Image: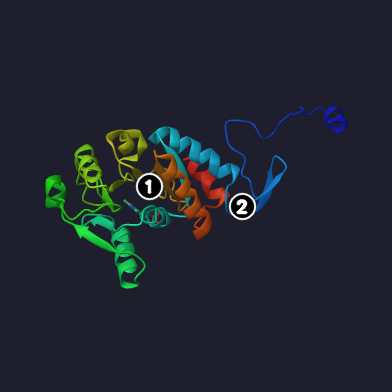
Amino acid sequence: MEIFTKLQLPVVEDRLHGPNPAVSLNATYYEGQRVVYGRHSNSTWEALETLIGELEGGTAAAFASGQAAMFASSLLTAGRLVISEDTYVGSRDLADFMVKNHLAQCSYVTEASLRTPTELTGLKEGDVLMLESPSNPLLVTYDIAKLAQACHDRGALLAVDNTVATPILQNPLSLGADIVVHSATKFISGHSDVLAGMVVVADEALAERLFEVRAVVGSVIGPVEAYLCYRG
Ligand SMILES: *Cc1c(COP(=O)(O)O)cnc(C)c1O
């Protein structure tokens, strides 16, 4: 303190609290008296998660990439991943990879059957129906509320990849979807300098499972990347 006064520099009482979150580069840190390992949580992730959670209206978890966020979403229930044919190529690659390597059961649904949700008779209890609306790159849109109802009637969950719309233009949870996925690499970060993903859920049990999946799989985002997404 004395040196600041001598040099007539302003004394900053608390450099960590300002409009931007601190970038917490800590693999372990204190939470009260407890030491926490950095694969479970990080204060910079939490700043981003609070922001995206507020924008989407749910509990958010940040991931290393959109692909990691998709993979985590497929692990939230015990059933199949039923995925729209009209999705980003990486999402179809993930579904194909999981089937080829016996990691999960996945199947595709056509645009036509997503238009008439009463025809989604193949959906079973515990399945996750994953779609993009608007889709990348064709920008096809679907009736999210109707599809959410069709999923819930069959005991399935609806996941919507909201990357293209962003939470500024559309909030799938408010339309009845159970899971929202983002490739934050795109508009959320917005500067082509980061790979990141987000998953947002409304249900508390799903949120718990989501954080468990991330900690166990280790598909965590770096604190600098989380900061860049927050800034974006
Ligand atoms: C890019 C993209 C993904 C994959 O995200 P990455 O951050 O590249 O892993 C998933 N869904 C959509 C719609 C995308 O545009």
The image shows residue 3 at horizontal and vertical percentages of 86, 33
- At x 52%, y 58%, the residue is 216
Q: Name which quarter of the figure residue 188 lies in.
A: top left
Going from the N terminus, do you reach mark 2 or mark 1 first? 2
Which amino acid is tagged 2?
Answer: Gly
Secondary structure beneath disc 2? loop
- Local crowd size for mark 2, using a 10 Å CA cut-off: few (<14), some (14–19), many (≥20): some
Disc 1 designates what residue?
182
Residue 138's label in the rendered image is none
The image shows residue 28 at horizontal and vertical percentages of 67, 52
Which amino acid is tagged 1?
Answer: His
- At x 41%, y 55%, the residue is 72
Q: CA distance from mark 2 to mark 1?
A: 22 Å
The image shows residue 168 at horizontal and vertical percentages of 35, 34
- At x 70%, y 39%, the residue is 32
Image quarter where the N terminus lies is top right
Disc 2 designates what residue?
38
Colouring of the image: rainbow
Q: Is residue 216 left or right of residue 26?
A: left
Secondary structure beneath disc 1? strand
Whether 194 is drawn above or below 19: the answer is below
Q: Say whether marks 2 and 1 touch (CB < 8 Å).
A: no
Q: Nearer the viewer, residue 208 or 226?
A: 208
